[in-house]
Amino acid sequence: MDLGLRGKKAIVTGATKGIGRAIVEQLVAEGAEVGFCARSEDEVAEAVTALKAKGGHVIGGAVNVRDGEAYKAWLEATARALGGCDVFVPNVSAGGGMDSEKNWWKNFEIDVLHTVRGCEALMEDLKKSGQGAVVIISSTNAIETFAAPMAYNAMKAALITYAKQLSQFVGKHNVRVNALSPGPVYFEGGAWEMIKGTNQKFYDATLRAIPCGRFGTPEEVARVVAFLASPAASLITGANVVADNGFTKGVRY
Ligand SMILES: NC(=O)c1ccc[n+]([C@@H]2O[C@H](COP(=O)([O-])OP(=O)(O)OC[C@H]3O[C@@H](n4cnc5c(N)ncnc54)[C@H](OP(=O)(O)O)[C@@H]3O)[C@@H](O)[C@H]2O)c1
């Protein structure tokens, strides 16, 4: 199936490693032109070089999405450099943790505000696209009890509500907005590798909760993002798509 992403302009946040990196690679493989960011300048430069070596049309920038002004300036400059924006994937998260109130501010500013600021900064471009699509990266932690009452889980839930309501608001401009909730995703250097090393019991219990007994991969998540971002998913908006290999147990209808 041709997803129809060839020539589309996409912006992805937090994409030098893990799920974000796989999303950029998948969008590039589908023929999209992609702008992405992360904080580490060296890692952005490495990713740009690697993706260009594969023939990708990419531009990268070093920015901390928590810095509202710098982030907005980066988004605007990237959209101008690409010649517009058809697809936006806010992917950065502050991650889990419940050691202090600081986590709540961090998860609010990074998970929620960076998504909202990004949608607002890019909305005119997304409207002009005629086939605009936003894919907000949430988590199964938002929809089922997981681990502890963490800011991460609550803020990921806020993103699902935001995606639904934004989709209603901008639907008349042919902009689709969806949330995507991956279950546990394992990759080298990622959170689950760290958990495996520090809390083997929790890691094993999580693995046992996945019926086929394996974690997801960044590439599997990236393929769902590419579909949702593409004109091939023209009927899907306001959804929270769960991609978790059966990790969640709730029946939703
Ligand atoms: N991994 C999982 O099991 C899992 C499961 C469900 C949902 N998710 C969600 O999927 C998304 C990606 O997760 P991941 O595990 O791939 O993350 P990750 O391995 O921590 O990668 C995060 C990426 O974002 C960049 N980044 C981090 N903070 C940033 C900031 N403040 N500003 C700009 N860039 C920043 C990192 O580079 P720098 O450090 O250089 O900035 C890196 O490129 C997150 O929204 C996460 O909540 C993950």
Image (spheres, rainbow, N blue to C red):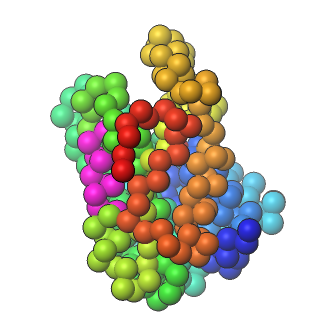
- Position of residue 218 measured from the top left corner of the image (x, y, whole percent): 61, 44
Magenta residue check for 65:
no
Name the quadrant containing residue 213: top right
Quadrant where the image shows the N terminus: bottom right
Q: Is residue 146 above or below residue 120?
A: above
In this picture, residue 74 sits left or right of residue 153: right
Q: Identify which residue, 145 or 103, lies in the foreground.
A: 145
Q: What residue is at 62 percent from the left and 27 percent from the top?
A: 212
Name the magenta segment's main secondary structure: helix
- Position of residue 232 measured from the top left corner of the image (x, y, whole percent): 61, 72
Q: What residue is at 47 percent from the left and 62 percent from the top?
A: 135
Magenta residue check for 156:
yes
Q: What residue is at 67 percent from the left and 53 percent from the top?
A: 47
- Position of residue 41 measured from the top left corner of the image (x, y, whole percent): 56, 52
Please give the count of numbered marks on the rendered protein: 0
Q: What stretch is highlighted in magenta?
A: 153-163
- Position of residue 177 measured from the top left corner of the image (x, y, whole percent): 41, 68
Q: Identify which residue, 236 or 191, lies in the foreground.
A: 236
Q: Can residue 195 be seen in this view?
A: no
Q: Is residue 222 visible?
A: yes
